[in-house]
Amino acid sequence: MEVFLNAEDKIPKYIQLYEQLKEKIISHDLVAGEKLPSIRYLAQELNLSKHTIDASYQQLIAEGYIKSVPRSGLYVLPIEEFSISKENGNTTAICSTDINNTIDFHYGSIDLEKFPLSTWGKCIKLAMEEELAILQYGVPQGDFLLRGEIRKYVAQSRGITCSEKQIFICNGTQQAVSFIVQLLNLMKQPVYFENPGYNEVRNILEKWQCDILPVPIESDGINLNTIYNGQAKVAYVTPSHQFPLGMILPIQKRLDLLKWAKNQNTYIIEDDYNSEFRYTGKPIPSLKSLDKLDKVIYLGTFSKSLLPAVRCCYMILPDSLIENAQKMIHQQTQNCSPILQRAIAIFMRDGYFQKHVRRMKTTYQKKQQTLVQAIKEQFKDEVEIIGQQGGLHILLKFKHADVDQLIERAKIAGVKIYSPKKHWIDSDEMSYLMLGFGGLPNEEILKGIMIIGSCFDKMNS
Amino acid sequence: MEVFLNAEDKIPKYIQLYEQLKEKIISHDLVAGEKLPSIRYLAQELNLSKHTIDASYQQLIAEGYIKSVPRSGLYVLPIEEFSISKENGNTTAICSTDINNTIDFHYGSIDLEKFPLSTWGKCIKLAMEEELAILQYGVPQGDFLLRGEIRKYVAQSRGITCSEKQIFICNGTQQAVSFIVQLLNLMKQPVYFENPGYNEVRNILEKWQCDILPVPIESDGINLNTIYNGQAKVAYVTPSHQFPLGMILPIQKRLDLLKWAKNQNTYIIEDDYNSEFRYTGKPIPSLKSLDKLDKVIYLGTFSKSLLPAVRCCYMILPDSLIENAQKMIHQQTQNCSPILQRAIAIFMRDGYFQKHVRRMKTTYQKKQQTLVQAIKEQFKDEVEIIGQQGGLHILLKFKHADVDQLIERAKIAGVKIYSPKKHWIDSDEMSYLMLGFGGLPNEEILKGIMIIGSCFDKMNS
């Protein structure tokens, strides 16, 4: 950060720093949501005491230019948001007091309070000590030891029998789908896609100019007639926990889908994105585990079960695709860090992973119960709760409410909630809210729902 | 790895293990080049003593099924290679003795002997301790602190004045180019590409169905007339160290190229892939530093200057592209691990990076001198040495030699050398060899050149 402090100036340094930071925020040189350097960091960089930096930051917080998020850091506030919250004055009184402590129901965050940070740190250290070569580019198909651990894990937890040769490591579901598009030559080809469905994957398919054929979601998952009547080259599905609606594809539909793939000589992409966290009923066998005809491309990820920041996921390919996939992958560099791949392998090998997943399942289940209970108390029968069987989010369907307005009001009140609209293809009206709860402590979940409820009541009064 | 040892069997366990591993290699279940689990790892997995595993491995090494690479691990040997080396008997005597210690002149490897591993480990630890939030998905544009450090670094080392807003972190040059193709809508559009040029980038452009227009490389870099006479939307160039030929684009050609971009209202992609390691003359100012008209997209990477395994590179975009790039990047997840991004930021902030780069520059320069000296002594005037001014590879141009045959013979003799053929578009005959030396100790460089020389002499005798 460029800051010029004048040592000769009589104005105290903390005021100089405060003025310059304020200027940067007003001129949008520092934009809303941007994170400021930590006190420690900036003190070191500017060669000032931590006290000086802290004093400047406190002044900026006091004046509402930045906010402090506990255990995360300091963030620039949007100036519009700030002025709205001031203008609205009393009507949003509950908000402005909370603006420095936004509660964010963003989907994707995970719980870090219970993460075994020091064990994980040791695994990274061990990875680098055990083998220097992992500091180089790494094996295009992915670390051999990690593939071995994944093989064992999916056998045990997802009923999938495969060999290391079928496993390809990559650094995100988007990369995996991009790879599959190239592997199966899907550019400009028709692809079945759930509607609603995971829009980050849809974005990638659209970038490759695939022709997206929407498959409606019924109460028990994808509508098979749509699939039978169309001509797509491949189907992307989330059978174990439909995204974002959360239902499970019944066994008969799974078998029918596999039969379709066989008859049409095509493939199914099974995105098993957070199979680890199921709270009710028996574990669901993956589509891949039923795939006797070798028609399923399976996608798994460590983003939810371990850390999003490892940027690591994996594909399990049918035998028939391995040869071409290996040819293709040798034209590319492996983009998941070999250091982190090996650290995950060690974390799994030494038994920490399964322990962590078990523990987090309980944690997330409790959070979800807290959330569902709070919603029921707050909204009574005004909303339907969708997708309670697993995962790190739920959907709320409002009977009578302008959801967009509720999102706006909640934002002013310091609670970020989101419409899942983007996951629908051509959706006009939208009465859903999507609440991700993975990263929120129970008390923030309770407080957040209370604030949303209060905004909702005001809208209807 | 699936291995079933029978505890009741009278055959010693190490023999059982040896037999099963041998079986896997013969049946290609374990393929050539595949890395075997470490002794420690397999001992833990199979619940056997390290001694047992070691005994099996030693037997396999002795019989030539696997080889041990010092400081790296154990690798499956190609069975064909093994038999060739046996068949050729005396003629390749020098080889077979070396087969367990392949010397690999692969381009891309870096020196790890001098890497400050424990400092780097501490930076990773500190990164996770300083801020838990970096364990989540991270900021799509890249860690703010890292962008700040890159801004300072490129200002100081490459003469580039830019703001953090212009810097976009991604996880490899291929990803960066893929992003640019989408940002500039280059699908099916004509793109200028150096011939020869970096084939990993060409692969990506071809995947996006760009129309590659080859620009011949002259003794002083790209041929500008080709560029003036064509209609490409963008030019991808390596002006500071042409890949793979290594020459520098003279200042006049740089200015002409910038003028072309201005007149055609198009962009130049400057891949400044290892500007850090220049051994002769003054530092070369980057094209971006001359870019008053904001037409240059700059690409930098940490793969050579720090570690390939961080999978981290960066783009510096013209102001005019930032808004669209930010929109685009928010549809994607950040694929360079936020943990490693922050660790790099700390490594730079605390002054280790610059120190490391300085040290490595000396190291690589010495290696290159060793290599060049050895080549001169070995080959006298049979070869021309190309690209001595910097980087981690040189090219050899043979006056009279079947390079493909030399590569084959050297391989049998335990030295891996490569043709740079793939970097040429439509190249038929090829008299070049590409020798990467970054990852090789001086004594292996000397030994390697001696072996290549011996193969060369035998070919010509």
Image: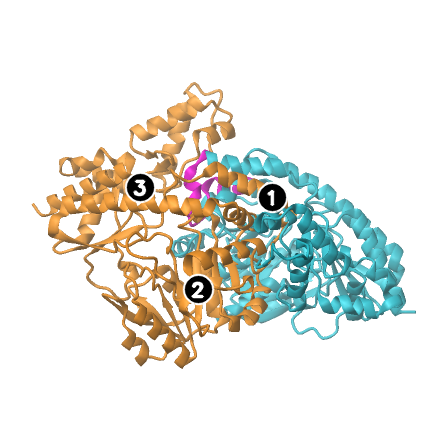
Chain colours: A orange, B cyan
Quadrant of the rendered image containing residue B344: top right
Classed neighbour count for the residue bearing mark 2: other residues with Cα under 10 Å, few (<14), some (14–19), many (≥20): many
Q: Disc 1: which chain?
A: A
Q: Is mark 3 on a helix, strand or loop?
A: loop
| Residue B308 x/y as whole percent | 60, 50
| Residue B391 x/y as whole percent | 70, 51
Q: Which residue is drawn at 59% across and 71% down?
A: B213
Residue at the disc numbered 3: A440
* Left-right relation of B274 to B332: right
Residue at the disc numbered 2: A298
Q: Are marks 2 and 3 in contact (CB under 8 Å)?
A: no
Q: Which of marks 1 and 2 is nearer the N terminus?
A: 1
Q: Do the residues labelled 3 and 1 touch (CB within 8 Å)?
A: no
Residue A431 against residue A82 in the figure, above or below: below
Q: Disc 2: which chain?
A: A
Q: Residue at x 22, y 38 (%)?
A: A447
Please identify the quadrant where the C terminus of chain B is shown: bottom right
The reply to the same-chain question for discs 3 and 1 is yes
> Which residue is situated farthest in the top direction here?
A10
Q: Does the magenta stretch include residue B146?
A: yes
Residue A289 against residue A278 in the figure, above or below: below
Q: Residue at x 32, y 50 (%)?
A: A392
Q: How far apart are marks 1 and 2 (CA)?
A: 30 Å
Question: Does the rendering let one see residue B243?
Answer: yes
Q: Which of marks 2 and 3 is nearer the N terminus?
A: 2
Q: Residue at x 35, y 50 (%)?
A: A108
Residue A128 disc label:
1
Q: Which of marks 2 and 3 is in front?
A: 2
Q: Is mark 1 on a helix, strand or loop?
A: helix
Q: Give the range drawn in magenta.
A: B130-152
Question: Does the rendering let one see residue B290?
Answer: no
